[in-house]
Image: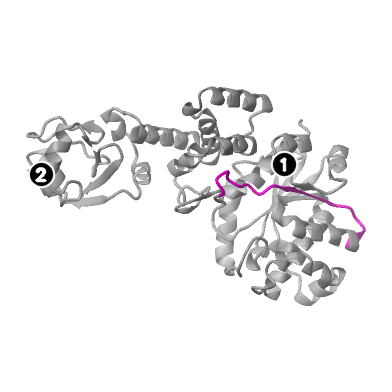
Amino acid sequence: MKDFFEELKWRGMVHDIMPGAEDQLKKEMTTAYIGFDPTADSLHIGSLVQIMILVHFQKAGHKPLALVGGATGMVGDPSGKSKERNLLSMERLQHNLDCVQAQLEKFLDFDCGENSAEMVNNYDWFKDISFLDFIRDVGKHITVNYMMAKDSVKTRLETGISFTEFSYQLVQGYDFYHLYKNKNCKIQLGGSDQWGNIVTGTELIRRMDGGEAYAITTPLIKKADGTKFGKTEGGNVWLDKKRTSPYKFYQYWINSSDEDAKNYIRIFTLKSKEEIEDLEKEHDEAPHLRLLQKAIAEDITSRVHSKEELDKAIHASKILFGKSATDEINNIDEDTLLSVFEGVPKIDIPKADLESVLNPIDFLSEITLGEIFQSKGEARRMIQGGGVSINKAKVQKIEEMPEINLLQEKYILVQRGKKNYYLIEVK
């Protein structure tokens, strides 16, 4: 068993901690919870910080609760938001909840005895509470002045905040109170932007029950270059492979800067302090090998997706960035192939045209509609200079069409120069 708080400290994962929280953790096996937003059918890598907190919490011998907000997802949390969020139907929320639960089960142990992880849904207790009961039994304990003082509210006063979102901190506070009463939950964990909401919960517990509960928050992850963590040109990096392919997920970590990688390896992996320090030393001696980035990418991709998906992502990377043999690209599956080459020019040609073409010059200029080379002369010069590959094999002869094995029985990959790729689909 590791000391939870000490583990978080050396990993740089503590932002604020309420006095008494550390003593509570040392006193007994403690139950703590983190809330997860169910407004999408997948978590993204921003949620990984909180997932890892629960993983460390469980490894330290404590009991983690993962709260999925079936009720609060219908309201919307103003924290960190500049405008009102769209509300979801019950059917959509239930679908999202099921998907999020399946993702959390990849990280937490739900069957290990006394400190087994547990999923809770706040809709289960809110569905039977009337509005009048709530404002009478809960609302009277927290003043409007107290609620207005919260940063999440103050930052929205100029642009406008609905009563729905204004009341969110009361709803989240009641979650903590309910779990305190029914699950003996003493701590709420979350990102630093949740401090105000969490403290409202500890205040409700004190005022409604005379009890003591605590808050621990983690820093919000920022990238060294100032861009937002977890974002790419295509948007969020999701845990669901239908939204972000395992290849793109793997590449996100591989492409992290050295400075960010030293931060990420502490937060997102379970490697020990000694292992990480050894890796950092090796990395600093040969930074071009990107040992830190590879260690992070391999660890996280295998846990979020699978070892098989990791191997496919590594294989695809070698094909794209390495000098792979021609037969390697024939083994890449269609989903990975399309993921790797998403965004490159795509050309459709009839099968009959491919069968009738006599040489690579005609194929690369006329048959592909001038998309790769606009003239035969340009194609000839590039081939003679060794700058054209078909399915990763160099085109050697200008007068004879090379034998082409269609990838997945319908694709051809053409490479012009080092960086220009074209994906041809034979129809």
Query: Is residue 209 shown in magenta?
Result: yes
Q: Is 115 on the left or on the right of 328, as rendered? A: right
Residue 356 coordinates in the image, percent (x, y) = 7, 44
Magenta stretch?
Answer: 208-226
The disc label shown at residue 116, or none? 1
Can see residue 138? no
Q: Residue at x 12, y 38 (%)?
A: 380
Please say if 60 is above or below 123: above
The disc label shown at residue 204, or none? none
For this orientation, the residue located farthest to the right is 210
Q: Residue at x 79, y 72 (%)?
A: 134
Residue 29 coordinates in the image, percent (x, y) = 82, 40
Residue 112 coordinates in the image, percent (x, y) = 71, 37
For this orientation, the residue located farthest to the front is 225
Can see residue 417? yes
The residue tagged with tag 1: helix, strand or loop?
Answer: loop
Name the foreground residue: 410 vs 387. Answer: 387
Q: What main secondary structure does the magenta stretch of the protein show?
A: loop
The residue tagged with tag 2: helix, strand or loop?
Answer: helix
Name the foreground residue: 17 vs 91. Answer: 17
Q: Residue at x 7, y 34 (%)?
A: 399
Query: Is residue 35 shown in magenta?
Result: no
Q: Amino acid at mark 2?
A: Lys
Q: Residue at x 69, y 47 (%)?
A: 219
Q: Marks 1 and 2: in contact by CB < 8 Å? A: no
Q: Which residue is mark 2?
A: 376
